[in-house]
Amino acid sequence: MTNVAIFGVGLIGGSIALCLKGKPGIRVIGFSNRESSVQKYLQRGVVDVGTTSIQEAAEQADFIFLCVPVGNLQEYMEKISAFNLKNGCIITDVGSTKSSVASYARSIDLGQATFIGGHPMAGSERSGVEAASYHLLENAFYVLTPEPSTPPEAVDRLTELLSHTRANIVKVDADSHDDIVGAISHLPHMIAVALVNQVRGYNERNDLYQSLAAGGFRDITRIASGDPSLWRDILIDNRHVLLRLIRDWNAGMESFAQMLEKLDGPAIEEAFRTAGEFRNRMPERRKGMIHSVYDCYVDVPDHPGIIGRIASELGNNRINLSNLQIIESREDVPGILRLSFRNQEYLDQAIALLENNGYSVHQ
């Protein structure tokens, strides 16, 4: 029996657990400091066994997944290094920064255990074990950051175990991972936060900013609503990369400022053209660090029961609606209904169904 211990059975840890639970020869152990959390894991059927004993979970494990916040990784590594870990035990994490935890793992004695950094590049607008899904990691990139000295056999064992997630395994060194993820995820989150706070400042003098920021502005800055403590830890941990990226970003903004000062239309066009060309080469509909949204907007008349009718039509056709929002509903304008779905398949089915029923749908 292969024992897999998961410390932190939330969105990511719970999704990994669901992919492994029930597979022949695998037993999933869920650890939490809180008995209420352990009971929740068991009641939801996410793990086979639950415990509040960190030592019990660690010493039984053939694989240990540290699915705790980045700021807590070293604390957990230090604790489990004091236990009598199994010979050949593989320890991995799911943090979105890799250099610091890899460096710390090199500095402590793990006995006959091996640390291999990991980062499943998928997420959700929800959090906690309630949001865990068997499909969350499917077709997502799952990055592993083994050291040059890591035994290939250990990497192969972890890769084989992770095949149950149906993710695409990518191997890269920890420093390169942090450079790349800093640029495609951490920097965009900082930019979104700075932009929203800039508009928030303007709104203190004129609340029309907030009113008119609905729609596009709200959509392109949605990542500014991330968990504050989570992002505090990530940004501080990857600060050396991010300070360089911020300087590069500032240089790009200064370049735009010069184009505007010089009324350099051709240069502005060229900037948009090259950006568009590069963006068009990016893979579409792939899971990544910034999770995709599957939303559509429906124009609805101000008729009693219209929203319930739309929801019922979707449900009757087994189309899973994850969220619904009324954006506008006044006597003098049509209502606008925002419908959110879990994946592209549900979105496509919903659009086809609603259009066939005479609704005006747009994305």
Image: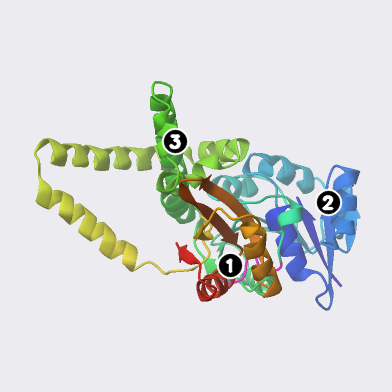
Q: Main secondary structure of the magenta part?
A: loop
Task: Report crowding for label 1: few under 14, some 14 to 19, many 20 or more residues within 10 A (C-alpha).
Answer: some
What residue sits 70% from the left and 47% below the top? 68
Q: Is residue 138 magenta?
A: yes
Where residue 201 sits, quadrant-wise, is top left
Label 3 sits on residue: 211
Look at label 2 and name its amino acid.
Phe
User: On the picture, is 25 further left or further right than 347?
Assistant: right
Label 1 sits on residue: 343
What residue sits 57% from the left and 59% below the top? 339
Secondary structure found at label 2: strand
What residue sits 36% from the left and 39% below the top? 246
What span is colored magenta in the figure? 134-139
Secondary structure found at label 3: helix
Badge count:
3
Q: Is residue 166 magenta?
A: no
Picture disc at residue 135: none
Along the line of sight, the residue nearer the viewer: 249 or 106: 249
Distance from Cα at disc 1 to Cα at disc 3:
29 Å
Image x and y of residue 21, in percent = 81, 69
Along the line of sight, the residue nearer the viewer: 310 or 159: 310
Label 2 sits on residue: 31
Look at label 3 and name its amino acid.
Ser
User: On the picture, is 68 further left or further right than 1?
Assistant: left
